[in-house]
Amino acid sequence: MVAREETPILAMIGITKVYPNGLVANSKVDFQVQRGEIHALVGENGAGKTTLMKVLFGLEKADEGDIFIRGQKVKISSPHDAIRHGVGMVHQHFMLAPSLTVAENIVLGAEPRRGLWFDRKKAEEISRSLSEEYGLHVDVRAPIKDVPVGVKQKVEILKALLRGSDILVLDEPTAVLTPQETGELFLALKALKEKGHTIIFISHKLREVKELSDRVTVMRGGRVVGTRKTAEISSEEISRMMVGRDVELRISRPTAASGKAKKVVLLAKNLQKYSRDGKEVLKKVSLQVRSGEILGIAGVEGNGQVELVEVLCGLSPADGGQVFIAGKDATGKSPGDIRNMGVSHIPQDRMIYGVAAEASIEENLVSTRYRTSPVSRGISLDLKAIRQISRHLIERFTIKATSPSQSVSTLSGGNIQKVVVAREFSTNPQVIIADQPTRGIDVGATEAIHRYLVEATEKGAAVLLVSADLAEVMGLSNRLCVMYEGEIVAFFPEASEVTEEELGLYMLGLKRQDPREIEAAMMGEAESRPASEAETGEG
Ligand SMILES: Nc1ncnc2c1ncn2[C@@H]1O[C@H](COP(=O)(O)OP(=O)(O)OP(=O)(O)O)[C@@H](O)[C@H]1O
Ligand SMILES: [Mg+2]
């Protein structure tokens, strides 16, 4: 007998998974996790991480291989089986019931009853004590639809814990969190580890992997490249293992020419927008982006960024205010007209706005230029030209696909994003509106996307970058603002001079700048009139 300490709590041995279209997503994967460790699983987009975890959670069936939990061979053919063996999974897209409260969601499927009736008080008690026990603080009575995404995630974790999960899988849990929420999550995960829980953590952010994990397993092309102690490997080495080459992890912003010399290409004035239920979601937002620069918008999701981008791209009309593109009025124009004015859009929700999922990669790649040569030849399409353009883009943007005719719906999350990015960058836009352009994107592709954005500005494009990833928005932007509750609450003319902590305070609404100062500084009047003077002068 092997000593108990050495038996891994989880061993997946020789796992092979071939999808119905013939794609080998996992090939003879060996993956072993020790009890009580935080184990990071990393790899490029499409490397097979999510697939491996879906096999573990009973969402996909492996073609070959065995799973051992606590030394016992187990058969997992459904999430129910997985939960029975103590495996819990927090998906990236939360699966909570929005109209129910936090407590109701936590106990869902295992509701306490009194007689025939749901026992609300008991549900709240259970949830409260669980939340205290694990230091995952939530208001158990709040409806899920009203809580921020960080809380939703805690609810998912509590749900899994209530069901007795001691192996917890988190697939890219921090992609949507603020730095403060990420910090809280990490504390909670470390506390869980102290209590003897085992955590498998998928992330593209190597800084987090370094900070949190005890060991790291790297996957590449459906195989495991290796498992290492995190303390004994640098971020550079991890990315080399992932990509097979050196990756530039440092983000460098464009060297923007002095602001005044460059012309304003994107101008928004006093944009207002009301949601369907009458809430003011954009409160007179004004901004300008100049040729050759990146203006970043930081903020917790749901503070008007989506609405702002929709208005700028013509996807939804503003209820007030104006938009100008290169000096021409674009207010109220259709998405097609705005595109023709030279605006590219990398949407945050690729599955809804970004791609036609059932269509092929090549159809998606050329979908915005059906009316222009060389794709269009009179009234027909030049299929040979399309194939040629597609092959070129697939190669240039390293889209991992079997053929240009493959359906986009069968690509991994990151590769779908690359299809959108390839299409949007390939038309030499004047303005690029990039909404979370690298969310869920691996280090290699992120490096490439950052480089394309910088190159586009060097060719004179104006980039509006909306990102919840602070390292990205701070590292890449020349100028930076923060949105909170539909307003721009802070503006920094030099993004390089701001700290993460300070931005976090504005993002959470704990701090704000004087609106008049913001307007003056943003719209370029600040150069002739120091902000402090403006304040005392009018106060
Ligand atoms: N339902 C499916 N049908 C066919 N192929 C699929 C399906 N789901 C995933 N794939 C393919 O399997 C491979 C592995 O995908 P998986 O989602 O496991 O990657 P990943 O490592 O999680 O990537 P990402 O970092 O982008 O999330 C990819 O090439 C993907 O295109
Ligand atoms: Mg994945």
Image (cartoon, rainbow, N blue to C red):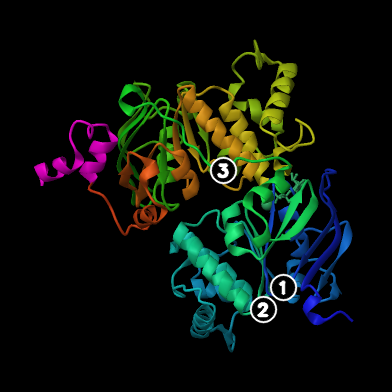
> Which residue appears at 65% of the width and 40% of the height?
416
Q: Is residue 227 above or below residue 377?
A: below
Q: In this orientation, which residue lies closer to the viewer: 457 or 139?
A: 457
Disc 2 or disc 3, which is closer to the eye?
3
**Residue 537 on the magenta segment:** yes
Q: Which mark is residue 234?
A: none
Q: Residue furthest front?
A: 232
Say which amino acid is labelled 2. Gly
> Which residue appears at 39% of the width and 36% of the height?
317
Q: Residue furthest bottom?
A: 115
Residue, disc 1: 83
**Residue 506 on the magenta segment:** no
Say which amino acid is labelled 3. Thr
Q: Mark yes or no: residue 278 visible.
A: no
Q: Is residue 461 above or below residue 30?
A: above
Q: Which mark is residue 164?
A: 2
Say which amino acid is labelled 1. Ile
Q: Which residues are magenta?
A: 515-539
Label 2 to label 3, Cα distance in Å? 34 Å
Q: In this orientation, which residue lies closer to the viewer: 120 or 128?
A: 128
Q: Which class describes the residues within 10 Å of circle 1: few (<14), some (14-19), or many (20+)?
A: many
Q: Which mark is residue 438?
A: 3
Q: Which class describes the residues within 10 Å of circle 2: few (<14), some (14-19), or many (20+)?
A: some
**Could you tell me which secondary element the residue under label 3 belongs to?**
loop
Q: Are marks 2 and 1 in contact (CB under 8 Å)?
A: yes
Q: Position of residue 330 (x, y in %)?
A: 38, 26
